[in-house]
Image (tube, grey):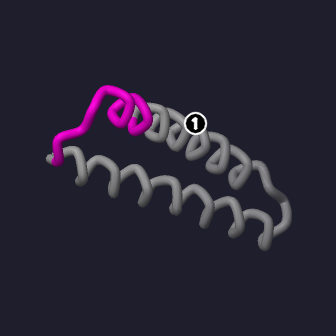
Amino acid sequence: MANLNEIELQNLRHLLQFGESSLEKYNNYAQNANDQNVKQYFQKAAQSCSQNKQTIMKFLQ
């Protein structure tokens, strides 16, 4: 892991928390969507959040 200062670590923590919150919301929206296009849109948004989280976690290892 790169040498990060306290502010950078806090920013990463906030990104992870925001991403997790967004992931839950997008999954919920997708489950409740009646229109298939809307459902797919939110599923893709949730997948993007998940990928972003994985990228950040890999960086921190």
Q: Nearer the viewer, residue 19 or 3?
A: 3
Q: In this view, does 41 lie above or below 54?
A: below
- Dominant secondary structure of the residues highlighted in magenta in the image: helix
Instruction: Give the left or right position of residue 13, taking residue 60 as reference.
Output: right
- In percent of the image, x 73 and y 48: which residue is there? 29
Instruction: Give the left or right position of residue 49, taking residue 37 as reference.
Output: left
Residue 36 location (% of width, % of height): 78, 70
- In percent of the image, x 57 and y 36: which residue is there? 21
Q: Quadrant of residue 60?
A: top left
Q: Is residue 12 above or below residue 48?
A: above
Magenta stretch encompasses residue 5: yes
- In percent of the image, x 60 and y 66: which residue is there? 44
Instruction: Give the left or right position of residue 14, taking residue 32 as reference.
Output: left
- In percent of the image, x 48 and y 40: which residue is there? 15
Q: Which of 22 and 7 is in front in this view?
A: 7
Name, please, the residue furthest toward the right: 35
Residue 58 location (% of width, % of height): 23, 53
Q: Which of 21 and 33 is in front in this view?
A: 21
Q: Give the range drawn in magenta.
A: 2-12
Residue 32 location (% of width, % of height): 77, 49
Magenta stretch encompasses residue 9: yes
Q: Which of 26 and 30 is in front in this view?
A: 26
Name the residue that disc number 1 marks: 21
For the residue marked with disc 1, what is the amino acid? Ser
